[in-house]
Amino acid sequence: MKSALSKSTIYIVLSAGAILMLLPFVWMISTSLKASNEVMSMPPAWIPSEWKFSNFAEALKVAPFDRYFLNSVIVTILSTIGELLTTILAAYAFSRIQFFGKNVVFAVLLGTMMVPSEVLLIPNFVTLSNLGWIDSYKALVVPWVASVFAIFLLRQYFLGIPKELSYAAKVDGCSEFKFLWYVMTPLAKPALITVALLKVINSWNAFLWPLIVTNTQELRTLPVGLSAFTTEAGVKYELLMAASTMVVLPMIILFFILQKYVVAGVARSGLKG
Amino acid sequence: MTIKPTWKSTLKALLYLAPALVILIVFNIYPIIKSFFMAFYTDYDFYNDVVFERGFGNFVTLFQDANFLKSVGNTFLFVLGVVPISIILSLFIAILLNSKIKLLGFFRTIYFLPFVTSVVAVAIVWSWIFHSDYGLLNYFLGLFGMDAIQWLTDPNYSMLALIILSVWKGLGFNIIIFLAGLQNINQQYYLAAKVDGASSWSRFMNVTVPLLSPTLFFISIISIINTFKVFDEIFALFNGKPGPANSTLTVVYYVYQKFYEEWEFGLASAAAFVLFIIVFIFTLIQLSFGKKFVHYQ
Amino acid sequence: MEIHLNKLTMQFNDIKAVNKLSTTIRDGELVSLLGPSGCGKSTTLMLLAGLYKPTSGKIYFGDKDVTKLEAENREIGMVFQNYALYPHLSVLKNIMFPLRMQKVPKKESKKLAQEMAELVQIGHLVDRKPAQLSGGQQQRVAIARALVKKPKLLLLDEPLSNLDAKLRLEMREEIRRIQQEIGITAIFVTHDQEEALSISDRVMLMNKGVLQQDSPPQEMYKTPVNQFAAGFLGNPPINFVTLAKSGNDKYLLNELAPFRLPNVIEEDKVQIGLRPENLYISDEAEAICTGKVIHIETIGRDTLIKVEIAGETLRALIDPSLQINIGDYCHLGIEEECIHYFHPETGVRLGGGDCHDDQTNMEKHA
């Protein structure tokens, strides 16, 4: 394709695309900092004439975004740690232990990946109401602390670690559990970071499930709170955009810091397919 | 040489698997089975978990419900609108990104950005962009002398608005995977084709496309399955409604309505079951299609 | 520590990787497990390590039955072919690892690890990561890690096969030096006969899971117990020809070529083994056979010739000062004691072969 398109054309096309991708974010931040009379000015003002950071405080007054934020942080951290633990243990069993029915269990688990998670919504809701967990952190966290995809990803990584290392560790007087903890886990750090990051992103952005299992405002996560805010804020777009910025910004920052792991994880999931 | 499993090793494996298995069985495997059965609950008391009647009634009701049929139609329309555009655009961008340019990482980051952000948040931002009077999009259209469009209130345009948002949101994921696929192609094939005198277009058609076919195949399956399940975008874009005049009512939205708004658990389960069947059939079609046309390196 | 193996058997599906292996390894001995790939030598080592559990049979360390003991409790050290160093740990931490597992205080384990690093001469590299070391250096780290906890038995699984030729020689002597310095019992797996013969006190030769011969290196070379042992050792390999008796004191190869053998055996048919280095060009009266030279090649200081006799080819290493050309007929002679006799069907040794070959000669041709 190189001869068909010159380098400069490529840069122009890519830059135009990049601007289109970024535009909504720029517009969001720009609006979030405008005075309410400037929001609806035509033609649109890209840079606010007056930087109204108070919009953020205003939004916090209308709805408890600090509380939502805390909920999202709690839910994200707990479900990520939980998933890492269950995944490390399960991936170890699938990659290093010979046991009866291994292939069957693995195939069944992979099979569940074919079922859209929306199908599970109703029975899971019934289960949780029977357990009396509706409107609790448990409902937001517990169903999500295990993931077949994560187990599969980590298992593949574990399989790439030479078997001799586990032999060497055994001879060195290391029990299997210690080996998993002291050798396998540190060695699998890139895969674990990938698993954790994808989990953090999914958990932070999850909407339908937290929408359904929370009724009280105190337990809303950011996306649910933000969605409710559209009714609460009415047509105050500067507040709506300020709130959206609060939801979006932490993930963008996290992504900028650790993007190579996110990209590697997504790419790996694609190549394995 | 493999060591044979023993009862002792099986017990040990079970201990390692237990935490994950308990969760997956309760919240993944059991619900799959349960939702299948629930689809046949025609009379169900959710509070006491008592079933009074079972039968195919839910499916009959579903297929007589104009809204459900509409939701299926809308879902297909949505898939048809999003998947081809998204794949062609992302492949195009991935090829540009793969042409040994500087700033690759920079561009990749920007294109991927929407993927890491909350659907709800970006949908709200887009609803502001789609605003009929003060929205950015109509402003741009106005610059070209076009009339303002009622993106979110005119049933003729609401689906288009949803498609634009979804393509924008999903582009980065596809680009990353295409890019990985492209970088995985051994450069020797290109050199060989060049030596054989192939033009750049024929190199693309005869080297890139066949060798990229596993990636193309994977992306099309994932894209179709994911677009079939669209919900968050609609809920946030249309402020908790399935678009004007149900114009963006999709199957998952229908499930949500029946289940969460109308408490029709049996009907909702039946609809979810239909969704699963549709996704399953598509996966099967693609798998058999893939076997014929996909070249693994 | 003395080690006894008693009818040790390991079965994978329907393959007996190790079949009724019995032997005793004395304290302080360095024993080589030698054999072609798939002969069961590595499996035997894994059984000794406790990484595999035998299908039947017993393993004793001293008087203690350790057959069912887990690897981590056997007090052994092991060196692997690919070294199996922990990539995420520094050299020092790698060596400290076994001590940390024994809950040795950090300060002390650091000191012990440093001492061990000095012993294997990598004291100056302790802060590096394994990936920053050369193959030989990694090997030294692996040895240090295996020895740091003062094991009673050191197991080495093809430790030299990933090294280049020059390093291999060096590390081979290094392993011998360290082993003797510590006085530890060591078992060394290799497929390289030269390695086995040069450093070990005793060689256990295995084939298809069965122990073929268990003897000091020289003895194995001089009096191989069967055709396999005779064929496995020696380079260029030993010549085998099957002869049929025809009258007193006369044997024929393929019913054509006469061989003159001392009349020490009774069988009508016999297989003899002639090591190329024992054969020489002789006059007709002394010769055991005569054939046509079809190939001449210089190997180092020797000249290798191939001689065709009744459709069979014999290799002989001869004095390079002799003038010989392709197509010449020549007479081959050999010392009577250097002829090995084997049963033509079973391959079992029948007699002969107590060659007055000295040690240097054996190593040269190993």
Image (cartoon, helix red, strand yellow):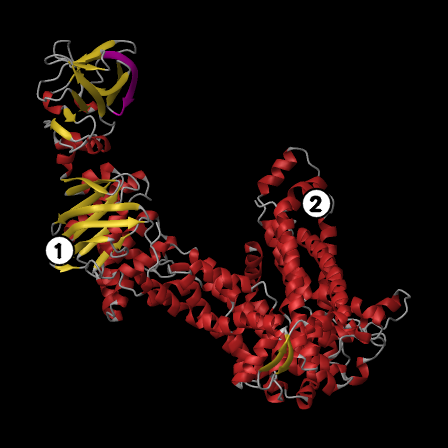
Residue at 21% x, 12% y: name it: C257
Q: x%, y% of residue C158?
A: 28, 45
Above or below residue C278? Residue A207 is below
Q: Which mark is residue A1?
A: 2
The local secondary structure at tag 2 comes to: loop
Q: Nearer the viewer, residue A46 or B257?
A: B257
Q: Which mark is residue C1?
A: 1
User: Given the image, on which type of amino acid does mark 2 rest?
Assistant: Met
The local secondary structure at tag 1 comes to: loop
Magenta stretch: give its range. C291-300
Above or below residue B168? Residue C189 is above
Residue at 59% x, 50% y: name it: B183
Please state if A262 lies on the left or on the right of C237 as rendered. right
Q: Does the magenta-highlighted stretch encompass residue C295?
A: yes
Q: Does the magenta-highlighted stretch encompass residue C145?
A: no
Tell me where residue C303 sits by quadrant: top left
Which dot, 2 or 1, sits closer to the camera? Answer: 1
Q: Which mark is residue B161?
A: none
Q: x%, y% of residue C280?
A: 17, 17
How far, Cα to Cα, is label 2 from label 1? 71 Å
